[in-house]
Image (cartoon, rainbow, N blue to C red):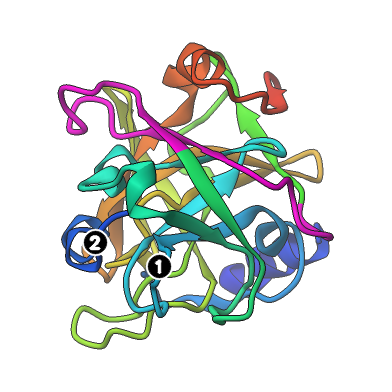
Amino acid sequence: MRYAATMMVVAALGCGAEEGDLERAAQGIANGQVITVGPIARSTVMFTPGNGDGTHGCTATLLDEAHALTAAHCLLGATPATEPVLVFSPAFSPTAPRRSVTALVPADPRSSVRADIAVLTFAGGLPEGYTPVGIAAAGFPLRVGDDVTHAGYGQTTRTVNDRGQLRAAPTKLDAVRNGRIYLRGVGSVCSGDSGGPDFVVRRGRLVQVGVHVSGDCAESASSTDVRAFEEFLRSAGGRPSFVRGE
C-alpha cells in the first residue's frame, strides 16, 4: 500500500564514451514501476554514446535548459569527441529527441570515488514538455526514514539487460554521512541507473536529493548527497532551482 501511495503522489506531480566504457561505468531500478508521464518523466533523461542502442549508458537529470546532472563515474572514457548524447524519452528510441553533450565536468577530476557527481553541458535547449526539477540545497532537511523515490533507465535484475525504459521505485533513507546518502527498501539501483536521481516530495514538489552511485539490484543503494555540492553545480555552469526548506 505504501508503495502504491508513493508512486501515485509522484505521478500526480506530474555517459558519452565507447559502449564498453559506459557498460563498465554504469550502475537499473529493480522492483520498479514504468514511468511515462509526470515530473520524473519530464526531468530524467538517458546519457549514452551517440551511436547507442539503449543497452548501454547512464541516467541523468535536468538542471536547466543547458545542463544536466549525472555521476562522475559515468564519464569514464567520455569526451565531446566521442559524441555523447542525452536521449529525451521515457523509453529509448533511435528517433527520440537528442541533445549533444559539449562539456563534461566532474566535481573532482582526480577521483570519482570521493565526489561522484558531474555536470553535463548540452546544446539545443530542452525539447517540448521537458523541465528541470528542484535540487536540494545545502541545509535542506533530510531525516532517516524519509520516503525517497529512485528513478533510472537501468536493468531490473542483475542478469537481464533490459535497460532503456525509465522506471521508479520507492525506498527509505537509511543513513547520511560523508557526502553520501544510503537507502534501503522495496527498490534498488542496478546497472544503467548510475547518475540517476533520488527524489523526495516536499509540499507537493519533487526535489532531487541524490545522484545514484551504486546498488545491489535488490534493496539497498548509495547516492551522492547533492546538498554537499551546491557550489560545484554553480561553478560548473548549472543554474538549477535550489530548494532550501520544507
* Residue at figure coordinates x 69%, y 36% from the top left: 64
Is 4 situated above or below 195? below
In the rendered structure, which segment of residues is drawn in magenta? 103-130
> Can residue 90 be seen from the camera position used here?
yes
Q: Is residue 209 left or right of residue 38?
A: left
Q: What is the x, y in percent for residue 20?
A: 17, 66
* Residue at figure coordinates x 17%, y 32% from the top left: 113
The numbered dot on residue 18 is 2
Mark found first going from the N terminus, 1 or 2: 2
- Kind of residue at badge 2: Glu
Is 35 situated above or below 145? below
Work out which quarter of the rendered image holds the C terminus and state it.
Answer: top right
**Quarter of image, res 177:** top left
Q: What is the x, y in percent for residue 111?
A: 16, 27
Q: Nearer the viewer, residue 108 or 140?
A: 108
How crowded pointer 2 is (Cα within 10 Å; few <14, some 14-19, many 20+) is rated as many
Q: Is residue 103 left or right of residue 87?
A: left
Q: What is the x, y in percent for residue 226?
A: 47, 29
Q: Which residue is mark 1?
A: 187
| 204 is within the stretch colored magenta | no
Is 173 situated above or below 216? above
Q: Is residue 209 left or right of residue 213?
A: right
